[in-house]
Image (cartoon, coloured by chain):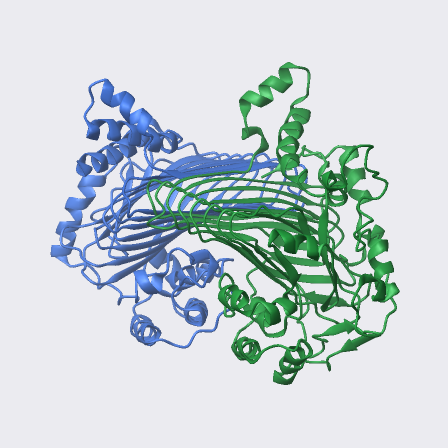
Chain colours: A blue, B green
Amino acid sequence: MNLVLAKTETGKALSDIFAIARNRLPGAGKVAGVRQQAFEAYERAGLPNRRVEEWKYTDLRVLMREVLPLAAAPDAVALKRARVAVQLHAVEDASKLVLVDGVLVPELSDLTKLEAGVSVKTLRATLEDASNDARSDLLLTDTTDAMISLNAALATDGVVIGIADGAALSRPIQIIHVATAPSASAFTRSYLKVGHGARATLVENFVAADGARSHQVNDAVIVWIGDGADLSQVRLMDDGTDAVNITSGIFTVGAKAKLNLFNMFSGGAVGRFQGFVTLNGEGTELSINGVNLLRGKQHGDMTLVVDHAVPNCVSREIFRAVVDDRAHSVFQGRINVRPKAQKTDARMMTRALLLSDEAEADNKPELEIFADDVACGHGATTGALDDSLLFYLRARGLSENEAQALLIQAFVGEAIEQIASDALREQVTATAQRWLEARR
Amino acid sequence: MPAVQETVDRVRRVDVDQYRYGFETLIESDKAPKGLSEDTVRFISAKKSEPAWMLEWRLEAYRRWLTMTEPAWARVEYPKIDYQDLYYYAAPKPKKQVSSLDEIDPEILKTYEKLGIPLREVAMLEGVEPRPGEADTARRKIAVDAVFDSVSVATTFKEELMKAGVIFMPISEAIREHPDLVKQYLGSVVPTSDNFFATLNSAVFSDGSFVYVPPGVRCPMELSTYFRINERNTGQFERTLIIADKGAYVSYLEGCTAPQRDENQLHAAVVELVALDDAEIKYSTVQNWYPGNSEGVGGIYNFVTKRGDCRGDNAKISWTQVETGSAITWKYPSCILRGDNSRGEFYSIAISNGYQQVDSGTKMIHLGRNTTSRIISKGIAAGKSQNTYRGLVTAHRKATGARNFTACDSLLIGDQCGAHTVPYVEAKNSSALFEHEATTSKISEDVLFYCIQRGLSQEEAVGLVVNGFVKDVLQQLPMEFAVEAQKLISISLEGSVG
């Protein structure tokens, strides 16, 4: 929707933030020009609100109110706190890239386990590399989403990972985003290029160090998957209790490739993952799955757009939301099938479990189909735990809490079991377990 | 899977270029001056000899409309409508005051005859003679209110309905004769400020039907309105208000056609239904406005606001629509389930062809306790058309025990059309149970298995199950509508996408 909004107080403050931050942001010349354009694009739209269809259920003007100033680079004390958080979330055997308050910190990162065929650079270095003519392209995307525009304008750092053609990695690469600063924002942007026939696993964590309060995260990850490549990606949004975490993923997938993507939101006051996947090559298999585990007044949103641009691709989406107390879960999924994309097989299933009378779940599974020889479907259900199942378990001696936990575990398990890697699946299951235990 | 040849042929037969109702009746008409202003509103109100409160109501709506902008969220595209380049009122010029059907302009009678709508009470169903011994009353009767451009030209069976206590008359008469009822209910379901088109309608509506069924009365016959746009450059704005008092029942049908013309014509109607305790309203539509030719020239812009309010406990409102016409359809018949245990139903078959654009669906708003709703929507897109289902199911905090089942399937014929599904499912109560599905195979595995076991193919079985379900509703339509509708829905459901 083209909505020209009067500049709010918030908008005014933000242009000051941009003016102040500009000198700190990496990249001059053309890069600075692209940032300026991106910022202007954001300013025209302003913070996404309920009048913007894609953000209908996640009104950032209400939930976020304003964009906070950029966090300062972390000092020694902050890094010490960050180290504790990193240790808690580190995945065994993984190469680790740690971004603290939007800046890559080499001393917390660990690239000793990096396998052959992988190159890693920081976004900052790439944007400042004057010999790279295409550096400003890193800030360009096809989307018109205001939060992605803002990300391009204000991204301070990130990682640029390249995986060579045919490189089959056996160990995961992990990016850990840690927030330490109170009342500040971090803008990060990362790139992953998986070469033809390559195989990789990427884990992304969003966490808060002890002492981080009311911080905002805006991350974008831009992924390019070559022909015959295979990428598994697991994202765990387990941020601080009052964090606002808005993350975007933009995926372009080649022919006969595989993408297995999983996102779980369990920590943070407001969290949204928006994924945009374009299937550009035939014979590709896509599996996107997600879980929202919400309590208190949390607001969790997963928004997916899968664009079948070519024929003969398969996509599967499974989403589960468990909503307790006064929390609010949102799932929006759109499947586009373009006119030439015949023989598309696309399925989407979203289910929400409401555990409290004040919980809310909104589902918007959309289909947009322009080809006639396709099998597309979606399903959506919303409801409470089945009384007869609870009774069955109670009758066999389980307590009310145990019975509920067992059923909830099975419910979210349907999405979690889609994760390709055994180790990561177990880790996610353990995180879900912890959430359930805290519920008692 | 692709559609079979039989399906393709069937759809071609209902193709846009074979519009049967495209003729024009040459008749002199009485028009309001072109354009829209307070004067136009006053003109219409004066033409209808309305009381002052009604004029005030219209003017308020008009002033509100001036501050509103046309909605742009629907998946339809059309050139900007110049609201000053339209006639807002057109009535066949009366030769003299008519007191009986014989005095109505024979041209108009002929028009309705051509359309197959019996205005003479004797001529009921063509070719159906009462069997020997069968009482006259045993035959099915339908009372018809015929609306020609902006005015109601005839209402049949008025007297017989009167005996049962049912009020069925043009709304313009009801405003004069039953002002208390109209004042109480008009705008109570679709307020004048509701949306751009509804507000426009509130300002300039010229006629439509008014139905009031008193407590405990089961309306003795089907009621029906037949809308016909004839005049050039004319917008048709009718307003229908149906009230079923406690324990009453009424079934109402609506049909629409228009001549084939090169320019687009605007149709912005408002339908309000009110069902009190234990009442039931069944509202059926066979919408067959001129859809434009195969090049996409001409056709009706159909922007309609239809809403039913289950105001009492145990009330039930059911919408059935067969949509085949209009260049643009923008229509979301909705149910507000306010009373406890109230029920809302929406059965829709929307077929688009040529360059037609359909954006239609429903809203089920669960407010009361133990309310249930059911949505069955079948969209069929062919040619270069776009067919969108847009629906909302919502349960509010206090809607304990709300239940909804939604199934919306679309079928595409050809690779230049589009079928889209945009459902909104919002649950704010943990005891709400909502199910939304968009794959035919999920309907009932048991029934399918049963059919397949007896030798039907999977496709035939699915067709049988879904058709059987929809037919149940369609068979409630009077014969001439049912025949037309049946032709349109017997289209095979195989090749469905969600």
Q: In this view, does B125 lie to the left or right of B235?
A: right
Quadrant containing the C terminus of chain A in the rendered view: top left
Residue situated in front as seen by the camera: A74 or A112: A74
Q: Is residue B332 visible?
A: yes
The answer to whether one can see residue A251 in this image is no
Q: Quadrant of residue A139?
A: bottom left
- Comparing A362 with A30, the one in front is A362
Task: Give the image location of residue A159, x and y in percent.
Answer: 35, 51
The number of numbered badges drawn on the structure is: 0
Residue A106 is situated, as x and y percent measured from the top left of the image, at 24, 50
Which residue is at 28% across, 26% downward? A390
* Residue placed most toward the observer, A184 or B170: B170
Where A264 falls versus B197 (above or below)? above
- Vertical placement of residue B44 versus B319, above or below: below
- The residue lying toward the viewer, choosing from B37 and B161, is B161
Q: As drawn, is A10 to the left or to the right of B479?
A: left
Asked if B460 appears above or below A250 in the picture, the reply is above
Question: Percent position (x, y) of residue A97?
Answer: 28, 46
Picture quadrant of residue A152:
bottom left
Which residue occupies the extreme bottom position in the image?
B39
Q: Residue at x 75, y 48 (%)?
A: B383
Query: In this rendering, would A373 be left or right of B367?
Result: right
Give coordinates of residue B185: x percent, y percent. Answer: 51, 63
Above or below, comparing residue B322 to residue B21 in the picture: above
